[in-house]
Image (cartoon, coloured by chain):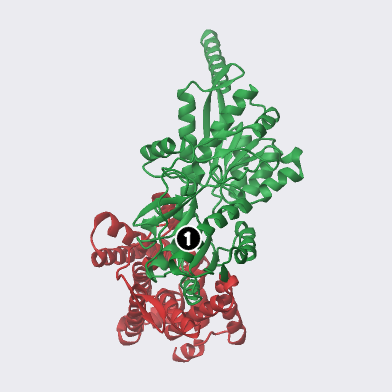
Chain colours: A red, B green
Amino acid sequence: MLQDILVTGLVNGGVYALLAIGFSLIFGVARIVNIAHTAFYMLAAYCFYTLLTKTGLGFLLSGLIAVGGVTAFSVLCYRLVIEPVREHEAAVLIATIALALIFQELMLFTFGGHFLGIPSTLEGAVRFLGVSIPYQRLLILVVAGAMLAGVWFTLYRTRLGLAIRATANDLEVASLMGMNVNRVAMATVAISVSLAAVAGVVVAPVYVVDPFMWLAPLVTMLAIVVLGGLGSLKGSLIGALIIGYVEAITVFAVPAGAYLKGAVALLIMVIVLLVRPEGLFGVAFEEER
Amino acid sequence: MLRSLTAGLAAFAFAAVATSGAQAQTVKIAILGPMAFVQGENHWAGAEMARDEINKAGGINVGGKRMQVELIRADTNEIQSVPDATNAIERVITRDKADFLIGGFRSEAVLAMQEVAMDYKKIFLGAGAAHSKLGANVEANYDRYKYWFRVTPVKDVDLVRTLFAVLGTIGQQIRTELKTDTPKVAILAEKAVWTEALVGAAQKNLPALKMEVVGTWQPSATATDVTAELSAIDRAGAHIVFTMLSGPVGISVGRQMGERNMKAVAWGINVEGQKDEFWQAAAGKAQFVSTLDTYAEVEMTPKTIPFVRAFKDRFKKSPTYNAATYDAIMILRSAIEQAGTTNADKLVPVLEKIEHVGSGSVLTWDKRHDLVWAVGKTAGIAVQWQDGKKVPFWPPNVKGMQPFKMPAR
């Protein structure tokens, strides 16, 4: 049973990590409470599904167009919906909730409430420690690692990353220093949503595509980002793995309570916050800032 | 001026009388279902077929007067919101003046809608919910709940009887092919009201069928990932995964079992598995997943094959059990023509005595207004996905059934 928990927790943690990185960037680093983040993930999944099954463009081209299209659309949404109310966090929160619900209803109207399946990019499975792991899930682990490295590089080794961190730290000072804070925020949204779109393209084949697929990951992502510490990419990764392992342990230890795995993960988050309100790696982030 | 005003008023009065006359010529039937979802689509499709068939034949004979069937499409949105469902049923009764109510899917929502329908003393023919309480209400308080009748499916306890009957057949095949005396069964049931009685019954009765229960796993009905559950089931060495799934988790189970190359075979209720779209939704991985179902091109009744073919021709897909709204309307027609009235109180005793040969079953009701369960009549059929096709395999004595297959070991 131990090897099952180890492998299942790692693989599921990888899926969560891929989803959490972009959310961590937008919510934790740029401090934009974009509740529509996972709705963009849903849009990318639908876009990928449509291109792949209706046009026969193939995995790579469909994936690239889906990621590019959704990212461009997110920039438009930012200019029209988020930027005008950026100063007011509550307004951003409400505006992005509305945006997510609009996307949901649009997908419901266009595709109906049907559950759609996307074929796996990589077929087959490998047995590791007696546990069967589909190649698609291994691909997710690899992509999650690559995305994490890419985001870290962008944030800490490029001028754009410096600008993103500076505006996140103090918007007014960054503006006084001559930075175009709106453009930086727009770039942050674009990077963040592109990560969500990549997740939609890579993760959706192991799940089911439907108009409500953005809700469950949103709650999990919030838990992971808060658990790991706002703005800490390392925290998001560790948080994702913790949630993945907690869920696996719940299912193996209490099979009849498998439906509680999400609640148990959130309970862990609450306990961590009570003991360490800044999250697991929040202090390091504050010091760094 | 006065003359034109008088003429206008006369025209208005004539139009009003003509309109009210036209309204009186129809029997208004509200079809209640989650219309953005497959369940609601089938509710509506089955009803449309019945309406067109009846109207083409001249309508319903109500005490010597021919009346056309008029359908009212009511989106209950019950999968997402129970209050939306009660609002919808209230609206069709009070605003649209529906004479009869047909449909419903989610037990929680139908229980709430049942209360509204009974408040207004409207006949409500259920075409989707399985919870026993719907029928138990009739027995407990007949005067209030007598207007409720369940057309499909059979109540949850009877679903268990069918499930066990098929499970016995599959278990025997496993005993023979795998040379094991006690097949191992993993119960995989979504956490929902309708599965409570089924899970309890399975845990209690499977040992009596000489089957070993290796565990019970209960994911959320909306879970999109069951890899941890399947990993545990795999480790437990289960031969059969006994499913009770109505939500999208049914697709995840089918797909992820295939991705993991599991040797266990899935049998039970998998509502998503009843749909034509299931194979595509599971990305072609749901080989050998089997489920209880209602319709296939087999001779369950003389009407089954013609109905299924007509449905496929018209809607380009197979019917799901919710399409039994067709039967509900046909039953209503029979009752109205026998009683010679649309009065609910006069129709109830007529409906109670009806035996109707329907599109997928032969229906009679017990004192709870639940269907009388019998193999070959109302117990339904079992189907298995084989190479992208839904293949019926039970009851074996019905013409058109094919062999049940298991993954190679």
Which residue lies at the image location 40% right of the left edge and 52% below the top edge?
Answer: B390
Which residue lies at the image location 62% right of the left edge and 83% below the top edge?
Answer: A274
* Corner quadrant of residue A288: bottom left
Find numbered disc 1 in the image and state the secondary structure of the residue it sits on: helix
**How far across and how far down the image is residue A35, in percent?**
47, 67
**How far across and how far down the image is residue B382, in percent?**
48, 52
Q: Which residue is mark 1?
A: B250
| Quarter that holds the C terminus of chain A | bottom left
Tell me if mark 1 has few (under 14), some (14-19) or many (20+) residues whose alpha carbon lies within 10 angstroms of its own. Answer: many
Lateral position of residue A14 relative to residue B43, left or right? left
User: Which residue is at the front of the view, B93 or B391?
Assistant: B391
- Specify the farthest residue to the top: B3
Identity, as a three-letter code, of the amino acid under mark 1: Gly
Circle 1 chain:
B
**How far across and how far down the image is residue A217, in percent?**
47, 69
- Let me know if residue B191 appears in the view: yes
User: Which residue is at the front of the view, B14 or A3?
Assistant: A3
Above-or-below relation of B398 to B174: above
User: Which residue is at the front of the view, B146 or B208?
Assistant: B208
**How far across and how far down the image is residue B152, in percent?**
56, 44
* Corner quadrant of residue B340: top right
